[in-house]
Image: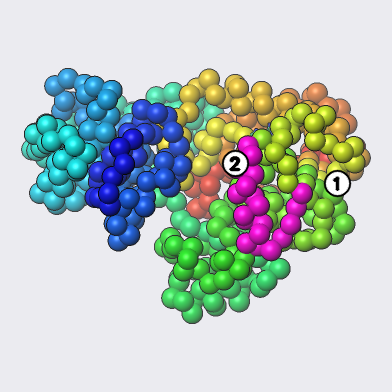
């Protein structure tokens, strides 16, 4: 990718999007690397362009195909991205056409591709003139209506024949920002007062006793006491996991797939003196657990390891609690990570389900009799969730499902499922298993 001096939000967004589209890299990672190239006042706009274009990419690409006489070459993915940026401004942001078009054309110059200015100008002006006809021509295409790739639509439809449209609509919304108040430092009511004193509008949520919903997203720098660990950013759905673990003082707890440590922090906030072992297969991601715990002033034993390869990391002492927040398709959190639409492949589901099964099977013998294993995913696919748990219970006669008095989501035949957007929260699956 070319390095640029501080430059326009649109040209940086085009480069970020080109890396996501052609190199199949994660939007969060690429954006973090490039956002500093944009003037501070334009960073929010650059982020909005990146997330918005990726969110609507399946639809915008169909429109772009109608406007281009022939497809752009692979080396010009940045120009393809600029075209999508222009279309996104015209169709979703309702940016005044003269600004949307001329600034997008200027961005091509900044990318050193002056030749593309005429092409972008012609395509965007044609869209402006023929928007009604073009929109009508794609309106029967589900990919255009729901802005999801066809395989993903089919999969939601298969699993949730009544709810799939509602799931897709929720996936296309901008998610609200939620916080978890650190109960070691203050209670939710007093933190709400601190927020109000800073002019940050917020309310308590039903998801546990620590969850707060902000009326509008806000930079963490503005949150009272954030860097002293008073609060963390975490969706309410993820905060419900700690309750299921039923944490008591004096327990030995394994957080098997822990990075970036959102739930590790919450587990320790319940009982900071507990012995918590946090594993993650990625040593880079493990560093983010250390950073998060240090901000919260909490500590755990951290190890970079494949949780399923117990011979390599287990010291032989059984656990009272095991949390498996499993690697999954993320099909419940597309509103937060819209690049999942682009980066996931249908064959990932089988592969991830096999990994989930192996982690569960290999960790089960490490649980004390009477101990609890909580299995969670941020997926909405049954294969990773209720079907996974049904098969696990068949393979392990010494396992029984615990159904808590306060269910964390809609009860399913096995476990509990929250679909994306239910009670404004992320899509999430929960199951709680006890060893007899
Ligand atoms: C859903 S994320 C965990 C989120 C985390 N629990 C939190 O609340 O912040 C799943 C994590 O599992 C890790 N992972 C994937 N395969 C693993 C394995 N075999 N053993 C341990 N960790 C694994 C990934 O690197 C990823 O960080």
Which residue sits at x=80%, y=35%?
313
Left or right: where 391 falls relative to 195 = right
Question: Foreground: 49 or 426?
Answer: 49
Q: Position of residue 98 (x, y in %)?
A: 10, 49
Q: Which residue is mark 1?
A: 320
Q: Which residues are magenta?
A: 282-301
Q: Element under label 1?
A: strand
Report the residue that reaches farthest toward the bottom: 197
User: Quarter of the image holding residue 111?
Assistant: top left
Q: Residue at x 77, y 49 (%)?
A: 301
Whether residue 297 appears in magenta in the rendering, the answer is yes
Residue for point 48% across, 57% down: 177
**Ligand 1 sits in which quadrant?**
top right
Residue 202 percent coordinates (x, y): 49, 68
Question: Would you say 79 lies left or right of 276 here?
Answer: left
- Residue 249 location in percent, x, y? 85, 59
Mark 2 crowd level (few <14, some 14–19, many ≥20, 10 Å Cα): few
Query: Which mark identifies residue 284?
Result: 2
Instruction: Please say whether residue 312 is one of the residues in the magenta stretch.
Output: no
Is the N terminus in the top left, top right, bottom left or bottom right quadrant?
A: top left
Residue 206, visible in the rendered structure? no
Answer with mark 1 or mark 2, whichever residue precedes in sequence: 2
């Amino acid at each position: 990718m070319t390095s640029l001096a501080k430059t326009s939000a649109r040209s940086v967004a085009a480069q970020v999007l080109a890396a996501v589209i052609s190199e199949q890299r994660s939007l969060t990672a690429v954006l973090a690397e490039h956002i500093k190239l944009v003037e501070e006042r334009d960073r929010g706009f650059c982020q909005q362009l990146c997330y918005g274009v990726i969110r609507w990419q399946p639809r915008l690409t169909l429109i772009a195909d109608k406007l281009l006489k022939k497809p752009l070459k692979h080396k010009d993915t940045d120009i393809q991205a600029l075209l999508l940026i222009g279309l996104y401004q015209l169709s979703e942001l309702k940016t005044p056409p003269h600004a949307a078009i001329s600034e997008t054309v200027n961005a091509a110059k900044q990318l050193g591709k002056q030749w593309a200015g005429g092409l972008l100008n012609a395509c965007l002006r044609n869209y402006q003139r023929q928007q009604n006809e073009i929109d009508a021509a794609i309106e029967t295409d589900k990919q255009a209506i729901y802005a999801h790739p066809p395989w993903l639509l089919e999969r939601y439809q298969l699993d949730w024949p009544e709810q799939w449209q509602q799931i897709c609509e929720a996936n296309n919304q901008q998610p609200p920002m939620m916080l978890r108040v650190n109960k070691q430092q203050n209670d939710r009511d007093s933190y709400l007062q601190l927020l109000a004193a800073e002019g940050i509008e917020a309310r308590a949520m039903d998801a546990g006793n620590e969850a707060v919903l902000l009326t509008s997203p806000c930079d963490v720098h503005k949150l009272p006491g954030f860097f002293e660990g008073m609060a963390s950013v975490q969706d309410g759905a993820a905060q419900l996991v700690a309750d299921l673990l039923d944490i008591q003082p004096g327990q030995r707890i394994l957080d098997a797939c822990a990075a970036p440590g959102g739930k590790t922090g919450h587990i320790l906030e319940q009982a900071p003196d507990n012995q918590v072992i946090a594993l993650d297969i990625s040593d880079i991601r493990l560093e983010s657990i250390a950073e998060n715990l240090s901000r919260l002033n909490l500590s755990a034993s951290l190890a970079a390891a494949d949780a399923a390869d117990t011979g390599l990391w287990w010291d032989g002492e059984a656990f009272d609690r095991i949390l498996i927040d499993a690697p999954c398709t993320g099909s419940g959190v597309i509103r937060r990570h819209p690049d999942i639409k682009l980066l996931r492949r249908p064959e990932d589901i089988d592969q991830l389900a096999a990994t989930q099964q192996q982690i569960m099977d290999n960790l089960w013998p490490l649980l004390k009799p009477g101990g609890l294993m909580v299995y969670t995913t941020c997926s909405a696919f049954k294969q990773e969730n209720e079907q996974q748990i049904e098969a696990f219970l068949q393979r392990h006669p010494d396992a029984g499902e615990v159904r808590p008095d306060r269910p964390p989501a809609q009860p399913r035949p096995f476990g509990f499922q929250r679909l994306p957007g239910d009670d404004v929260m992320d899509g999430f699956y929960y199951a709680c298993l006890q060893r007899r």
